[in-house]
């Protein structure tokens, strides 16, 4: 360990990290790498800093709010900012997804969405609808609900029996059909029909909801095939099953629209969000429910509390202040529109890496890219991890998952910086063995 570092690195048990390796090779961020050079954030932190770092309006809103009202409960009591943020979110929400439940993270938003789905059916007298359908390779955070409907084996295998009554759709990763697609791949809409098989197996009367990421992020950027989400919507609707979009990554402009639901023109019943809601500055999540979902639960309840669910920090005033300032920043700087304008530039630039060493697929949509590398023989993931470290040392922050590089820059990225990402990556890919 570097003796000049003031901290005992062992005390912080780091999440999703090789702690043993890291503590031998620490890389600490304070906007500059440990070696003192500047870092271009190619991933908006962990897909959350959509407006870029250090935005004065958000910083000032947080500073102001912490001095005015540092905490206020929202159980049986309120404070204005939580209502103001919810109203602002309602204005940008697609369709009638006009009721907002606040959480503190994507994992909590997923849990909340799943519980709302169960409560909805029960309130309507269909309490037998308890099954939840996720998808292979799905990532829905790390709560027990999220890992149960999620489909990433390493996130599941250690943790016992998980939730009962969960089934999974097949994933849509099919490079043999779709490699180097630009935008939505042509092949694969029929994979949504697997839901009919699952319905035939369990009967619709036992199924509460289907949850998918419209664009799967953590598993390595899987763009939905053309027509796939539309088919999931049609099948869920036909069988009275709720459709939940997990937009923790795709929400707040990542595709050049407020939500992926807008981009794809597919209206789910519930949307789970977090991350870009507050630009990552203060933890917060928000779950959007359609009018009919909210009404069924709230109007269908007996006297008293309608939904026995919530968090100490639901609608936290400082997070709400950060959220409002973030939405102001997105609006006044036209950042969603900017992402839409840049998307074709991004696509063109990223696909120019098709002939770089080790590259076996490139997938892009909005301001997201996945670059899949051939695994090193006998050492899967090692090549991408080396690319991650090499890129960092060259001043570029990327994410890697398996042997896939994932990119999701802040929406303020410039064309020159897109060039810088591509040029740096070309050099990195030439260097890694
Ligand atoms: N749903 C989705 C779709 C996510 O991407 C979560 C839920 C959980 O959010 P919280 O706030 O509980 O972490 C996520 C989180 C990566 C990466 O590099 C992605 C996430 C988190 C950390 C890393 O792909 N997504």
Image (cartoon, rainbow, N blue to C red):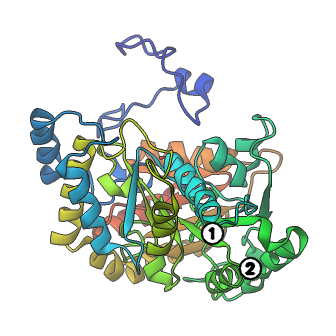
- Where in the figure is residue 401, as x and y percent of width and height? 62, 51
Q: Residues within 10 Å of mark 2 (few under 14, many from 20)?
A: many
Q: Residue 299: give x, y in percent of width and height.
A: 46, 65
Q: Is mark 2 within 8 Å of ligand 1?
A: no
- Identify the residue position indicated by label 2 in the image: 192
Picture coordinates of residue 406, whole percent (x, y): 54, 59
User: Above or below — where is 177 with respect to 324?
Assistant: below
Horizontal side of 225 relative to 302 (left or right) equals right
Query: In the image, is 374 to the left or to the right of 255?
Result: right
- The residue lying at 18 percent from left, 64 percent from top is 328
Question: Can residue 67 be spotted in the picture?
Answer: yes
Residue at the outermost right position:
201
Q: Residue at x 70, y 85 (%)?
A: 238
Q: Nearer the viewer, residue 229 or 59?
A: 229
Which type of secondary structure does the marked residue at label 1 adopt?
loop
Secondary element type, mark 2: helix
Q: Is residue 140 above or below residue 160?
A: below
Distance from the alpha carbon under mark 2 to that under mark 1: 14 Å
Q: Position of residue 93 (x, y in %)?
A: 36, 73
Q: Is residue 162 left or right of residue 74?
A: right
Where residue 35 sits, quadrant-wise, is top left
Residue located beneath label 1 in the image? 222
Q: Is residue 39 above or below residue 368?
A: above
């Amino acid at each position: 360990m570097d003796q000049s570092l003031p901290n005992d690195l062992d005390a912080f048990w780091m999440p999703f990290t090789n702690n043993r390796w890291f503590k031998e090779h620490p890389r600490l961020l304070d906007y500059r790498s440990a070696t003192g050079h500047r870092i271009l954030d190619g991933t908006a932190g962990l897909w959350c800093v959509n407006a870029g770092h250090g935005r004065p309006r958000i910083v000032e809103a947080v500073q102001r709010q912490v001095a005015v009202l540092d905490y206020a409960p929202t159980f049986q009591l309120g404070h204005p900012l939580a209502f103001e943020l919810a109203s602002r979110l309602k204005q940008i929400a697609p369709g009638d997804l006009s009721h907002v439940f606040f959480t503190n993270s994507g994992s909590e938003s997923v849990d909340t969405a799943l519980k709302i789905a169960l409560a909805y059916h029960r309130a309507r007298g269909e309490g037998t609808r308890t099954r939840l359908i996720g998808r292979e390779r799905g990532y829905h955070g790390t709560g027990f609900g999220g890992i149960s409907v999620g489909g990433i084996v390493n996130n599941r295998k250690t943790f016992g029996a998980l939730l009962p009554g969960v089934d999974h759709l097949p994933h849509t990763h099919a490079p043999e059909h779709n490699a180097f697609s630009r935008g939505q791949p042509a092949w694969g809409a029929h994979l949504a029909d697997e839901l009919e098989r699952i319905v035939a197996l369990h009967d619709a009367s036992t199924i509460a909801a289907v949850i998918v990421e419209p664009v799967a992020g953590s598993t390595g950027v899987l763009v939905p095939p053309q027509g796939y989400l539309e088919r999931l919507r049609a099948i869920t609707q036909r069988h009275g099953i709720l459709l939940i979009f997990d937009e923790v990554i795709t929400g707040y402009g990542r595709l050049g629209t407020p939500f992926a639901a807008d981009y794809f023109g597919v209206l789910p019943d519930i949307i789970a969000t977090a991350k870009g809601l507050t630009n990552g500055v203060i933890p917060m999540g928000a779950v959007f429910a359609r009018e009919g979902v909210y009404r069924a639960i709230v109007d269908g309840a007996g006297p008293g509390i309608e939904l026995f669910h919530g968090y100490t920090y639901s609608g936290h005033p400082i997070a709400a202040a950060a959220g409002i300032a973030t939405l102001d920043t997105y609006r006044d700087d036209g950042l969603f529109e900017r992402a839409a304008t840049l998307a074709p530039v991004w696509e063109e630039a990223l696909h120019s890496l098709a002939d770089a060493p080790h590259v076996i697929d490139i997938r892009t949509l909005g301001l997201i890219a996945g670059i899949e590398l051939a695994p090193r023989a006998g050492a899967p993931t090692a090549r991408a991890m080396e690319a991650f470290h090499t890129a960092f040392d060259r001043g570029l922050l990327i994410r890697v998952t398996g042997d896939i590089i994932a990119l999701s820059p802040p929406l303020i990225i410039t064309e020159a910086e897109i060039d810088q990402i591509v040029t740096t990556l070309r050099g990195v890919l030439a260097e890694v063995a």
